[in-house]
Amino acid sequence: MNWTGWRHGGYAAGLPENVRIFDTTLRDGEQAPGFSMNPDEKLRLALELEALGVDVLEAGFPIASAGDFEGVERIARACQSVRVAALARATPGDIRRAAEALRPAARPLLHVFMATSDIHLHHKFHKTRAQVLEEVPAMVALGRSLVAEVEFSAEDATRTDPEYLVAVLDAAVAAGATTLNIPDTVGFTVPQEYAALIAHLRSRVRGADHIIFSVHCHDDLGLAVANSLAALAAGARQIECAINGIGERAGNAALEEIAVALHVRQEMFPYTTNIVLEKLHATSQLLTEITGVAVQPNKAIVGRNAFAHEAGIHQDGMLKSPLTYEIMTPRTVGRGEHEMVLGKHSGRHALQVRLAHLGYQFDTTQMQAVYERFIVLADRRKVIDDNDLHRIARDLAATPAAVS
Ligand code: KIV
Ligand code: ZN
């Protein structure tokens, strides 16, 4: 494996290539503590995800429960413009159940997975490499006999011997897999290493040119998005991700971060997606509403503070030009205006603009007095709201001339 030597555009050069967005909010995301959803809730979110423009919608793990089966089946029936995927371990029972749930789908995708690292083989399955190498193609072939498209995932791929991984993926392709997913199941890899692994697999797996290479990164080291993006330059053309980055443990790569990074840094990532960016915020909010789990305030793109400015220097810059401190407008991702939060770090400029917005105008001397009152209050409170400003302004506006 060699990190140097590969470059963007590993596929045919020319027009920007499309990267498939595979959404796993309803499967890996739903699997995380506190995020489980009933079939009605899943269907509601699935319709929103379809409108958002995801290419693949992983609807659940049908063997897991009757509710999961029902969720997948109802989504397969309702979401006809998107590929609907269902997860199955590499066993006949799982595969048949997933295929059954997918029956109403217009574009079904069966997602079969099997762990390939020695750690998993030894501790989880007590299986030999040879056994797994025999079972994977048999199960992929069974899947292909039931569903037209089969994705094979080599669970814990990033801790698997790369030579053995090539052998397993070769066997999966020979048996009919149409997509190969290379999960960083435990969030262990780093961008350079992951890109080198994808490049290695693309150059070594037989028939790789006709296969979509997919990435699926967990965020245990906070690198899920960076790893996913790094893999594109090495030839990956599908990214598995979840709204708000939900998923097992620290979660999956955040869909909104992937989509917006590709949009904002087009010169670095010459790829397109079908995501309607303006719907990102509403989709994130719907997930929060359904699960009752709020996103952290400082979360990129969808967090409450993602477009809020409190420091005086930043507010002054923003008032002069939003280019100073914002790399996208809030409207790009379907949010309203950016927010100027007035607190103890805020400066006179933002305070004056807010007061003017509320109808108050002060001369320089009065403004100094208002600012001093504001800072005393702000030292005691986290945030100063408009009611506080009205109070300060009225107290200090002894002369009617000061109030417009
Ligand atoms: O993280 C993982 O390896 C998975 C697989 C089932 C794709 O979620
Ligand atoms: Zn996962």
Image (cartoon, helix red, strand yellow):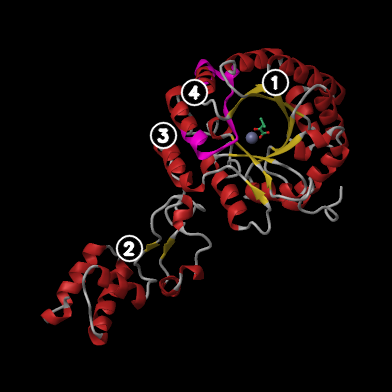
**Residue 285 placement, left or right of 387:** right
**Would you place residue 273 above or below residue 73 in this image?**
below
Q: CA distance from mark 4 to mark 3?
A: 19 Å
**Would you place residue 267 above or below residue 56 in this image?**
below
Q: Secondary structure at mark 3?
A: helix
- Ligand 1 closer than 8 Å to the CB at disc 4? no
The mark lying in front, picked from 3 and 2, is 3
At 27% from the left edge and 83% from the top edge, which residue is drawn?
368
Which corner quadrant of the image does residue 294 belong to? top left
Mark 1: give few (<14), some (14-19) or many (20+) Cα within 10 Å: some
**Residue 240 placement, left or right of 172:** left
Assign the C terminus to one quadrant of the image. bottom left
Q: List the residue tagged with mark 4.
A: 78
Residue 290, numbered circle: 3
Q: Which residues are magenta?
A: 48-69
Q: Secondary structure at mark 4?
A: helix
Give the mark nearest the N terminus, 4 or 1: 4
Give the mark nearest the N terminus, 2 or 1: 1
Mark 4: give few (<14), some (14-19) or many (20+) Cα within 10 Å: some
Mark 2: give few (<14), some (14-19) or many (20+) Cα within 10 Å: some
Q: Secondary structure at mark 1?
A: loop
Residue 148, numbered circle: 1
Asked if residue 223 shows in the view, the reply is no
Q: CA distance from mark 3 to mark 1?
A: 33 Å
Q: List the residue tagged with mark 2.
A: 383
The mark lying in front, picked from 4 and 2, is 4
**Membership of 56 in magenta stretch:** yes
